[in-house]
Amino acid sequence: MNIAEAKSKLSELVARAEAGEEVVIARNGRPAVRLVAAPSVEGSPRRRAIGLWDHLGLELGDDLFFKRDLELEEAVDATRIFPPDA
């Protein structure tokens, strides 16, 4: 594949290289470069996973973000809006 053709199909060529194919681009009919997928690098940006802090071994209680409001519970229990279960 020549350089002009490679410029117009760069996205396709990158996808093919990522899929494991080796793409050779020629200049004046002679191979000039090889396009191959880059090796994965540790520490590169990636999507955050659920449980991101699991490796810290922290024991986080269920009430970390929600603390019971006893005053509110008593106020609701004392109203007639929510009658007691029969």
Image (spheres, grey):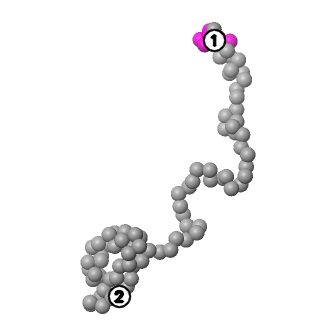
Seen in the image, is 30 located left or right of residue 43? Answer: left
Return the residue nearer the eye: 65 or 19: 19
Identify the residue at image location x=30%, y=76%.
Answer: 7
Q: Nearer the viewer, mark 1 or mark 2?
A: 1
Seen in the image, is 5 located left or right of residue 75? Answer: left
Q: Which residue is mark 2?
A: 32
Q: Secondary structure at mark 1?
A: loop
* Residue 31 place in picture, x, y as percent: 33, 88
Identify the residue at image location x=35%, y=79%.
Answer: 23
Q: Give the CA distance from mark 1 to mark 2.
A: 81 Å
Seen in the image, is 47 located left or right of residue 22? Answer: right
Label 2 is placed on what type of residue?
Ala
Q: Are marks 1 and 2 in contact (CB under 8 Å)?
A: no
State which quarter of the image contains the C terminus.
top right
Mark 1: few, some, or many residues within 10 Å (few <14, many ≥20)? Answer: few
Q: Is residue 58 magenta?
A: no
Q: Give the vertical position of 17 relative to 46 (above or below).
A: below
Region in magenta? 78-85
Label placed on residue 45: none
Label placed on residue 85: 1
